[in-house]
Amino acid sequence: MIPVIMSVIVIMTVAAIYVFQVVFLQYVSLSTVERAAFIWDDADRQIITGQLRSEEQYGLYENEIMLQLVSKIIPIDNSQRTTSLDIISDSNSESDESNTSPLTTLISDKLVLAQQHIEHMNLNVNGQISYSHPALLPRIEVTLKQQLSPLTWRKQQVFASPAYTTHRSLVNPISFIRSVDLIMYYTEKLKKMTSSEQSEWKQNGGKAIKSFSS
C-alpha cells in the first residue's frame, strides 16, 4: 500500500511542477506581448511602464505597418529587415529601463525591448519573438520553451519541455490613417503618369518610399 501511495504522490508532484511551468510560461509570454503591443507606436517608450524613455519619435512613415500595402505598388527590398529575434536567457544581464539609445527602425527597436524584457528575467527559457503581417492587422508573437523538463532520467527528458506560444494584433489607428493616406497619394500620383513614367518612377521607388525602405 505504501509504495502505491508514494507513487501517486510522486506522479502528482511531477504533474504539478509541469503544469506550473506551463502556466508560468503562459504568463510571461502573455504579459510580454501585451506590453509590446501597448508601446507599439511612434514614441520611444519603456516596455514595463509605457512611459517615454526620450522625447524622440520615429519618422512619419517609419512605422512599417504600411509596408505590405506600399510594396504592391512599388518594388521594395524587404530582405534585410529584422522581423524576428531569438530569446536566450542570460543570468548576467541586467535590465536598463533608462536606456536611450538612438532610434533606428520601429519594428527592430520594439522587438529588442520585448526580447530584453524576457531575457532580463533570468527565467532559464529560450524561444523567439517575431513580427508578422498575415492579414490586415500586423501582429507580434512570442514562443517560449523551458530549457529543462520537470523530470529527467540519465540526461534524457521523460517529458517534453514545457512550451507556450501567444500573439497579439497591433492596433495603431494613427499608423493606419497614415498608410491609407500614403496609398491614396501614390495611387493618384500614378494615375497622372504615362506607362513609361510609371515604370521609371516605380524603379526609382519614390523619394519617401526610397528613404523609408533604405
Image: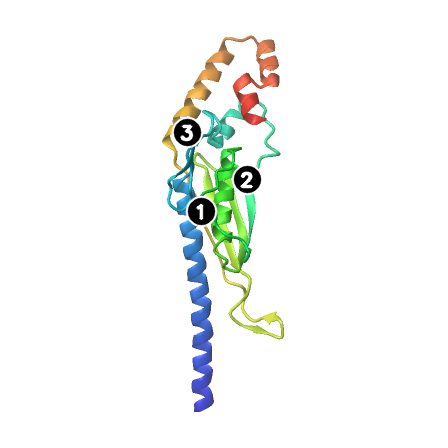
Q: Is residue 146 above or below residue 65?
A: below
- Asked which quadrant contains residue 147, the reply is bottom right
Q: In this view, does 202 lie above or below 164?
A: above
Q: Is residue 137 left or right of residue 93?
A: left
The residue positioned farthest toward the front in the image shown: 98
Q: What residue type is labelled 3?
A: Ser
Residue named by callout 1: 167
Picture residue at 59% right of the left edge, 24% below the top: 75
Who comes first in sequence, dot 2 or dot 1? Answer: 2
Kindly state the secondary structure of the residue where label 3 is placed: helix
Point out the image quarter for the C terminus: top right
The image position of residue 156, as x and y in percent, is 61, 71
The image position of residue 76, as x and y in percent, is 58, 26
Who comes first in sequence, dot 3 or dot 2? Answer: 2
Q: What residue type is labelled 1?
A: His
- Near-viewer residue (59 or 53): 53
Kindly state the secondary structure of the residue where label 2 is placed: loop
Kindly state the secondary structure of the residue where label 1 is placed: strand
Residue named by callout 2: 83
**3D distance between C-alphas at marks 1 and 3:** 20 Å
Residue named by callout 3: 175
Point out the image quarter for the N terminus: bottom left
Who comes first in sequence, dot 1 or dot 3? Answer: 1
